[in-house]
Image: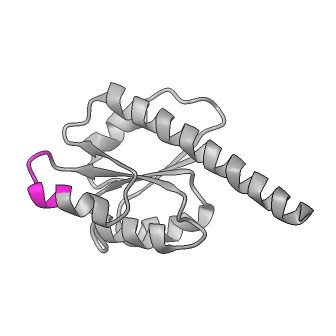
Amino acid sequence: MKILLALTDASNLEIIRPIPLPEEYELNSVSDGIELLIAMQENPDLVIVDVNLPEINGYECCRLIKHDEKNRHTSVILLMPTQDLVAWTRLSDCGADDFLQHPIPPHVVKSKIQLLLRLSKLRQQLSQQALRNKIQD
């Protein structure tokens, strides 16, 4: 399973990278919105996106990911500032699956990653089952 990080702050990357994940997980990172959208061609299972990405902000990247037929089921976590009330209202508008707030507690990041990767596996299983059912009909 693939995890893609789109973060502008190196300290956030240092909190997320050391989180122990099973060997079958691949962790990649980019630093702006354009790189993120290009990296989506690799079909990550989970994307963690800083809302303050340069070039294309995290909200717009999330919206574009969720409107792309190929990636619409990809789990997206937005990394948001804690005191930004506007960010809270934009969270659901862009289709994000979850959020993290600055500063990021490592145990919370690990829990959210594990949860959303489980959901991603379930979505894949459901899609495969639906395809099999369609073929059988």
> Which residue: 33% across, 71% down?
60
Residue 64 lies, with reference to residue 30, above or below; the image says below
| Picture coordinates of residue 96, whole percent (x, y) | 37, 57
> Which residue: 18% across, 55% down?
88
Residue 1 visible, this orientation: no
The one nearer the camera, 131 or 60, is 131
- Whether residue 128 is in magenta: the answer is no
- Whether residue 85 is in magenta: the answer is yes
Left or right position of 66 against 31: right
| Picture coordinates of residue 16, whole percent (x, y) | 38, 37
The residue range painted magenta reads 82-88
Left or right position of 72 against 58: right
Left or right position of 40 against 80: right
| Picture coordinates of residue 100, whole percent (x, y) | 28, 43
| Picture coordinates of residue 127, whole percent (x, y) | 70, 56
Residue 126 lies, with reference to residue 134, above or below; the image says above
The one nearer the camera, 116 or 39, is 116
Residue 121 visible, this orientation: yes
> Which residue: 75% across, 57% down?
130
